[in-house]
Image: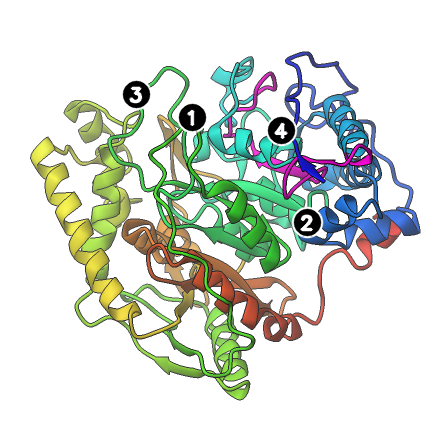
Amino acid sequence: MKLIKPKLPSLQRTAAVVPLNSSGATLSGPDRGIPRPDSSAPTAEERAILALSATELARRIAAQELSSVQVVRAFVGQITRHNVTYNAIVQLDLDAALERAKAADEALARGEVWGPLHGVPVTVKDTYATRGLRTTAGDPALVNHIPQEDAVAVALLRRSGAIVLAKTNAATLAMDMQTTNALFGTTNNPWNVNLTVGGSSGGCAAAVATHMSPLSFGSDLAGSIRLPAAYAGIWGLRPTHGVISFRGHIPPKPGEVDGIRSMAVLGPLANRVEDLELALSVLAQRSPEDATVTPLRERTPAPASVAGLRLAYMDELGGVPVSREVADALQRVVETLRAAGATVEKAQPKDFSYQRTWETWGELVAMQGGYERSNLERRVGRLFAQGSVANIPHQCKILDPISVEGYMRALTEQATQTNALERFLADYDGWIVPVASLPAFPHHAPSRTFGIFNVYDNPLRVDDKAVPYYVATQSYATLFSVTEGPVISIPAGLSTQGLPIGLQLVGRRYDDWRLLGVAKAMEPLLDKLRPQRWGADQATAGS
């Protein structure tokens, strides 16, 4: 078959019906283009399609065992059944998706292959610019923002043959660890709608976990891929910084100066590790739109099993408490890996400063374009947030005045801590640590807002401890945002309340392929720790 560059969709869009929620009221926000809810159960054919990984969907479409139109319709059906409950999808590009699916099938009939994701529907966070399709980042000021160009990552997805089916919900400007905004409301956890699915890529995680999307693409500055993946019971990859183009993401807002140096990355969320691998192969490449992307180390054969792997773990870092549920889940993973032949030892870097790394995260964020404020504004903000974030290293630094000299010191500190972690990781195939202090928690409203920064006076409960919101949700993730290496959020079973628990698998910079290989070897063992997987009953019953 010939490899053919696919024709990109036009800028024209057709208005669609405003959806209803389960009580009959409309979901909040602008028209989402989603047909009215359908309570009927999926057909046997649709159930079979929804159960497949994106990788397997791509294989079957390429072999013409499934048509792209069939696959797109199956996922649209799942969206109409479940989005009213979970609020993961904020924009469905239905007509364009079906048109492109039809073109994909016709191309295959002519012997043409667009790429490795030919005809496979995917979703992207509503922070990715999408040509001709509303992109808001959950910000009411951007409700009418329709980009004229795709983000580089979206362009690469389209060139690979993917069909961008829908946009997923995000925290306002991707700046919270829950997924809610004034335009589209709150995304609910697929395992318990009274709980958060995390943020800011919660729409991606909920869509994948509920099989409304086989593969979704989010972003991560402080755990925004890793936390939602953990709370939804799926896999998420924060790749090495710089290996996937960030160009075309919001923030920064359209027209604003891009960050001096951002720790934020784009990455995939999926139900299977093979889909993370497929996504990385598509996005981790230079393109005409962005030649600054840094290449990964060459791909090497993945280990056939965990036998012979050398792994480290820690159940607490820097004195930040974790719940007994999280610690127990980590211990079960350790014991499972040891029983399968891996060497797993409790260890942490001796010359790595958690405190300085957290402070460095705040200092670097403080200097990013789009978040710069005058010294007066920062002092006012510090007073405004007093008692809530004033003593949280990675948060209070965001509100501190910072000079160019201070910024350079922060970059030097970042290099120091990164090198310390890399020396430690050189002796291991991966380091397993918590994603956050606790499993998914009830929807938690901010006490007030300063600009786009939500302030939470009410702490979260980590067993019998009251822990500040940002300490509990960000501390474990921001460490590895600073050091910028690959991290995979791995599903590690369920809590006693039946909620997913995720852990971080941390690897060496630019060794993303190796880390994915380790995760793939762990996958069948971790599957055994998940006696219940979302969707088995719901997808069948359509409930």
Q: Reading the chain from its start, which is encountered first: label 4 or label 2?
A: 4
Q: Which residue is farthest left?
A: 405
Answer whether residue 124 is magenta in the image.
yes
**Residue mark closest to the camera, 1 vs 3:** 1
Instruction: Indicate left or right for 277 with 161 as reference.
Output: left
Kindly identify which residue carries mark 4: 5
What span is in magenta? 108-134
Q: Reading the chain from its start, which is encountered first: label 1 or label 2?
A: 2
Q: Is residue 380 visible?
A: yes
What is the secondary structure assignment of the residue under circle 2? helix
Q: Reading the chain from its start, which is encountered first: label 3 or label 4?
A: 4
Instruction: Indicate left or right for 467 with 499 as reference.
Output: left
Among the 4 quarters of the image, the one containing residue 11? top right
Label 1, label 2: how far apart the Cα atoms are: 26 Å
Residue 370 higher or lower than 293, as above or below: above
**Residue mark closest to the camera, 3 vs 4:** 4
Q: Residue at x 53, y 14 (%)?
A: 148
Label 1, label 3: how far apart the Cα atoms are: 18 Å
Among the 4 quarters of the image, the one containing residue 231? bottom right
What is the secondary structure assignment of the residue under circle 3? loop
* Numbered label attached to residue 257: 3
Label 1, label 4: how far apart the Cα atoms are: 16 Å
